[in-house]
Image (cartoon, rainbow, N blue to C red):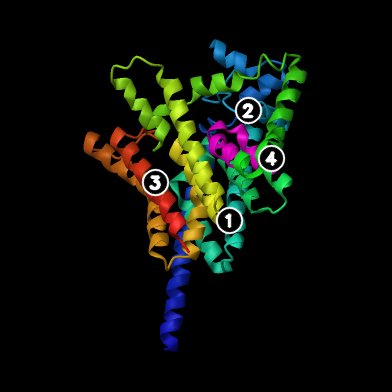
Amino acid sequence: MKWNILNNKKILILFLILLSLLACISILHGFKIANSYGSVDFQYSPTVLFLEKINPYETFISGKIDGNIMLAQYPIYSHVTYVVLAPLGLLEWEVARLIWSLLIIITGLYCVILVSNFCKLKVIETIFICLIFSCSTSFRNLISNGNVTTFILLSFFAVMISRENFKNFLLGISYFKFNFAPILSLFILLKSGVKGLLISSLFCLVGWLIFSLYLNQNPIENLFHPIQSALKGFDQTLARGDLFTILGFLKYFEISFNLDIFRIIIVLVVSFFLAKDISKINNKMLILNLLLIGNLLTFGHLIYDYIVLLPSFVYSYSNRKSIHAKISLIIILYFWFGIRLIEYFIDFIKRGSFMISPVSAPVSFEVFINFLLLIVLYYSNKKIY
């Protein structure tokens, strides 16, 4: 009996060592890309323009981006982004992207620790989940692209806070990335009323005013610049499985109405009903999971945004005896690992090689499948107990 236990411990240790090596390779690969030809989403060049008293939104919207905006660093976020990133904008590009990629890694791993503590996992379980998360395509892709989603996830953890006003303020920080705002803002409105919604908007509102004052521009005139830039700069073909993208397929049919306005209205209506459904729940961890899954369900998100499934993964793991938790774990592992494996397979069938593009766009049937899986994930989480 003792031999069996010891043998199991040895196997566990060997498994963790192997997983640790894979996690290190994955993170270092993302880090290497970020500090060579990557960091394409890091908002460095728009921040530099802001510091030089040039409106980055106007520069992008006008199309005069040559020599002004690097890579794909399009200004598609709220005004406050460039106020907050100003210290990094004062640094040289190589130094700024190094610091930024380190911040992403640290914040991502901190999120694992936080959510593991919420679910009261053992240290060894936290380490195991940390290694799985570090190996995921989503986290590696996030590091290499330099996106802000780890900070969005950290903001959403404010759901666990009891003080309502403070909670709403911290939740509202995530508004600076617009595709995470609709369901959350509607949820806050339903739970805390207009006052709660206004408090949650303070971070972005103050950033907008500072941005306008620094550039000596009329705040009203540049209020909608971020939305204009986002509509122009977001590559919808890379979205993974959401209602907004699926409704966009209607462009292949002869329609007599404005498709963008139509699908925005439809998605906002669906977002309202999802927010209403979530607002009836008392379990804070479940609220967190459903808000994040609901965001992926409604508006377009790239593969790195699927790191926000981390709380659902930990929650499902902590309740893994439930069949619904097992279903949730399988679906999340598919999003973290399976999507890329399928793309490799499809690429091999098409070209006879595994040289897949790092920004490979999903095909239509994959978008539908992913959307359906997110619906299953949403309802599976609701059934976990």
Nearer-the-camera pick, 272 or 146: 272
The Cα–Cα distance between marks 3 and 1, rounded to whole angstroms, is 21 Å
Sequence-earlier tag: 2 or 4: 2
Residues drawn in magenta: 170-187
Q: Where 343 falls versus 17 (above or below)?
A: above
Total numbered circles: 4
Disc 2 versus disc 4: nearer the observer:
4
Name the disc covering residue 78, or none.
2
Q: Can residue 24 be seen at all in this image of the molecule?
A: no
For image coordinates 24% across by 34% down, the residue present is: 351
Sequence-earlier tag: 3 or 4: 4
Q: Which residue is mark 4?
A: 196
Residue 92: % across, % down: 67, 29
Q: Quadrant of residue 174?
A: top right
Question: What element does badge 3 sit on?
Answer: helix
Q: Main secondary structure of the magenta part?
A: helix
Q: Is residue 375 left or right of residue 311?
A: left
Amino acid marked by disc 3: Ile
Disc 3 versus disc 4: nearer the observer:
4
Sequence-earlier tag: 1 or 2: 2
Q: Which residue is mark 1?
A: 282
Mark 1 neighbour density, 10 Å: few (under 14) some (14–19) many (20 or more): few
Nearer-the-camera pick, 8 or 342: 342
Q: Where 122 falls versus 180 (above or below)?
A: below
